[in-house]
Amino acid sequence: MDKNLKSAVEIICLLLLYTLESYHPLFLGRKQRANHAARNLLMRFLNLCVIYAVFSAFLALGTYWTFEHSFGLLNWLPGPSWTKTALGFLLYDLYMYLIHRVNHAVPFLWRFHRVHHTDDQVDVTTALRFHFGEQLITAFVFRLGIVPLLGLTLEQMLFYEIFSKPLILFHHSNIALPEPIDRILRALVVSPNMHRVHHSKWLPETNSNYASFFSFWDRLGRSFRWHEDPKTIDYGLPEFTASAWQTIPGMLKTPLAPVRPPSD
């Protein structure tokens, strides 16, 4: 596996889902979809330029060092490589769940993560809308710690990202999925209707459904919440309703705005 395959999968899934939500959307009548997508994709591009272009080499070096020194949990356990890859997938997905909860619980980290939540027209491009500050902290600094501890190889990291990215794009999409199908999906993985609750303006719903791939983390962590009618969910954050926050300068300045008290 290589990064080219990962990028190709992401681009193909993004284009496919954007097309599907154009023809069969849950929320109807959205205007300026192209402008909305362009802003979110530009944030993704800024992340690629600022973070990945500079720091991805460090992550590669970290996984190489882990492999060369047989360091980390997966290297200390017996068994064939495929069982270690499966276990690595599960453990890294648990890490993704936990770090997502931390991003909501720690005010400093929430300042950056809320850029993702200020989107009041959640669609497939929202899955790529993150502040580079969050990417620097969680996708680089924290990851440089967890990858050696777990003993993940670069191939195992790519394996997780190639399989998780399509699902993450899918459960952010505005595709109207029949409830029986969504119910079957969320029995194991994060479904669109499940993740839509997480993007609600209502704080108890915002602070729920943190999982990225496997939905059972939220049930085990008692953070699962259900909303009977997804069409009634109001997206965004109440303190960021002004249109200026949806612009690139607005998104970049969002971490500087006051933090809403947890009791609100």
Image: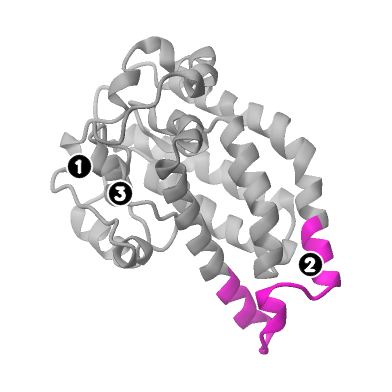
Instruction: Give me the C-alpha separation between circle 1 and circle 2.
Output: 44 Å
257 or 231: which is nearer to us?
257
At which x and y percent is residue 42? Answer: 58, 24
Judge whether residue 192 can be spotted in this image: yes
246 left or right of 6 in image: left
Q: Which residue is mark 2?
A: 66
> Is 204 situated above or below 46?
below
Q: Which residue is mark 1?
A: 230
Range drawn in magenta:
62-88
18 or 193: which is nearer to us?
193
146 left or right of 95 in image: right
20 or 204: which is nearer to us?
204
* Furthest residue in direction right, as rendered: 68
> Where the N terminus falls, by quadrant?
bottom right
> Where the C terminus falls, by quadrant?
top left
Instruction: Give me the C-alpha separation between circle 2 and circle 3.
Output: 34 Å
